[in-house]
């Protein structure tokens, strides 16, 4: 579902953050200054599994001897990846706070942008300091600025800086007690050398917050503020679909500013509403009404996929979500077909129906065609073309069509493939119309809860599905 790309891009743009974390970045790399953050895991809302994973590192830093005695490998580098504003910096500073470590907060671009020829030297200085002040956490934000794949562009300065970073990481002795945390929005850009065992070998994905996490984040950012009983954080969490932690902390802060302006003793729901509108306006999107509408579209789109997948009985569903992830605004996770090499014609048609169901659902409910099904359509087109040209599953007969013959027959191929897709699409529309109540129920659940498991899907679809 890509139709909201622009909107989400705006949403992911950094917004001015008035309320900073307890720890502010000071004078980045010039003198590699460190701080001793007071941040703890309690300041990080939600993200329970991630915190659990980091506890191991905290424990190691607190009592390294316990691990050394057992000959356990020492973690050196952890890589956080995911969209901006989701708490990567906050988590890293919490690890430092929990272990009472010195925290070095630097940005990849600072090494390579300012002066030529100093990147490598800066890395060296940084690590020297970190060792001296150990236990230390070195946090390198935007690590892709120095760690991007080396063959993509030849940049001597960058290469030297990256090489120095690798040298420093390899040179860690058992006793150094320095952990490096890297952060990037794009794991795929990084040079493999960085990801090798003994370097950044732990990769932790930090995604956009779901409803529950948004609620927890709002709680964290309001618990030191005088909040009126009119404020319902659960409702606010529902209204802020697609927002990240930075946006939410911004809303809480803006609401406080509105309350001060009103000379009010407490922050009321009116202040929060105004704050929400202001943050949304800052994103250049029209209004919260628009956000609701788009959330509804994504809910019906994904519900369509899920329902038809259940109806055709292929690829069992693991999870359905409308929480944006990467480029996708929603997704249906299906169990992979275990080692399947052969598909029947019916199964291929079933697959196409599942793919077409998002678009079909949107058309039934909103009577529109949106750009959100672009990816789905591409996959459908591929399958239909393969059916015609590779598997002999069309009226053109049981033969493979390639090379010269293919260009010679291209019009016929197109017509055959198009017929297959059109028939599939019509049948998918029928399937959904015959199960329209289930479609409403499933998409309502998605709209409210944002994610759904296989069991929940089954329990929602009460009656026997009409095939
Ligand atoms: N899980 C969370 N709990 C509490 N606050 C959060 C959470 N996630 C984000 N925030 C708030 O959002 C702000 C921005 O988060 P942070 O700087 O850690 O994001 P980031 O992932 O490092 O973003 P970037 O990639 O843009 O550097 C934090 O100052 C914090 O107030
Ligand atoms: Zn889709």
Image (cartoon, rainbow, N blue to C red):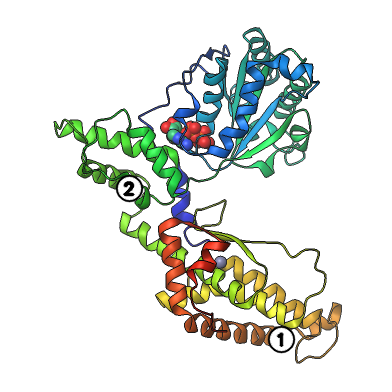
Residue 287 makes an appearance in the image: no
* Residue at disc 2, CB closer than 8 Å to ligand 1: no
Q: Name the residue beneath numbered marker 2.
A: 236
Q: Nearer the viewer, residue 461 or 99?
A: 461
Q: Residue at x 46, y 28 (%)?
A: 42
First in sequence: mark 2 or mark 1? Answer: 2
Do the residues bearing badges 2 and 1 touch, measured as CB atoms within 8 Å?
no
Task: Tell me if residue 440 can be seen.
Answer: yes
Mark drawn on residue 32: none
Mark 1 burial class by Cα count in 10 Å: few <14, some 14-19, many 20+: few
Give the percent coordinates (x, y) of residue 77: 69, 27
Disc assigned to residue 411: 1
Rendered location of residue 283, percent (x, y):
38, 47
**Which element type, helix, strand or loop, lies under badge 2?**
helix
Where does the image place residue 7, in percent across and percent down from the top left? 44, 54
> Mark 2, residues whose alpha carbon is within 10 Å: few (<14), some, or many (≥20)?
some
**Left or right of 124 on screen, residue 28:** left
Q: Is residue 85 left or right of residue 32?
A: left
Name the residue located 32 percent from the left edge and 44 percent from the top edge.
233
Residue 210, given in percent of the width and then of the height, sits at 47, 48
């Amino acid at each position: 579902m890509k139709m909201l790309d622009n909107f989400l891009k705006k949403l992911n743009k950094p917004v001015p953050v008035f309320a900073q974390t307890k720890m502010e970045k000071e004078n980045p790399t010039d003198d590699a200054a460190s701080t001793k953050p007071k941040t703890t895991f309690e300041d990080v809302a939600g993200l329970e599994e991630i915190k659990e994973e980091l506890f191991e590192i905290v424990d190691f830093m607190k009592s390294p001897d316990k691990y050394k005695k057992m000959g356990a490998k020492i973690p050196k580098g952890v890589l956080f990846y995911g969209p901006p504003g989701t708490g990567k910096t906050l988590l890293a500073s919490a690890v430092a706070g929990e272990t009472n470590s010195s925290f070095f907060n630097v940005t990849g671009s600072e090494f390579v942008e300012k002066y030529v020829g100093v990147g490598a030297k800066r890395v060296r200085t940084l690590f020297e300091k970190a060792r001296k002040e150990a236990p230390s956490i070195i946090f390198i934000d935007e690590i892709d600025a120095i760690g991007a794949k080396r063959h993509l562009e030849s940049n001597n300065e960058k290469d030297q800086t990256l090489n120095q970073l690798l040298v420093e990481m390899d040179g860690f002795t058992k006793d150094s007690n320095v952990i490096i945390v890297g952060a990037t929005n794009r794991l795929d850009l990084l040079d493999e050398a960085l990801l090798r065992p003994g370097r950044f070998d732990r990769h932790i994905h930090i995604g956009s917050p779901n409803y529950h996490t948004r609620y927890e984040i709002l709680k964290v950012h309001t618990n030191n503020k005088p909040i009126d009983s009119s404020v319902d954080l659960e409702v606010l969490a529902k209204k802020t679909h697609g927002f990240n932690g930075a946006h939410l902390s911004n809303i809480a802060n803006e609401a406080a500013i509105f309350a001060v302006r009103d000379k009010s003793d407490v922050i009321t729901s009116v202040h929060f509403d105004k704050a929400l509108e202001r943050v949304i306006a800052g994103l250049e999107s029209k209004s919260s009404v628009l956000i609701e509408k788009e959330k509804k579209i994504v809910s019906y789109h994904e519900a369509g996929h899920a329902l038809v997948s259940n109806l055709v009985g292929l690829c069992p569903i693991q999870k359905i979500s409308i929480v944006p992830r990467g480029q996708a605004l929603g997704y249906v996770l299906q169990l992979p077909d275990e080692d399947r090499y052969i598909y029947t014609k019916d199964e291929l048609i079933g697959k196409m129906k599942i793919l077409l169901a998002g678009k079909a659902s949107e058309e039934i409910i909103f009577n529109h065609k949106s750009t959100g099904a672009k990816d789905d359509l591409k996959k459908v087109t591929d399958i239909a073309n393969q059916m015609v040209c590779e598997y002999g599953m069309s009226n053109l007969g049981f033969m493979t069509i390639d090379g010269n013959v293919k260009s010679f027959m291209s019009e016929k191929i197109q017509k055959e493939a198009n017929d297959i897709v059109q028939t599939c699409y019509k049948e998918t529309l029928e399937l959904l119309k015959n199960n329209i109540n289930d479609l409403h129920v499933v998409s309502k659940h998605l709209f409210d809860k944002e994610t759904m498991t296989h069991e929940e899907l089954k329990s929602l679809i009460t009656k026997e599905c009409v095939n």
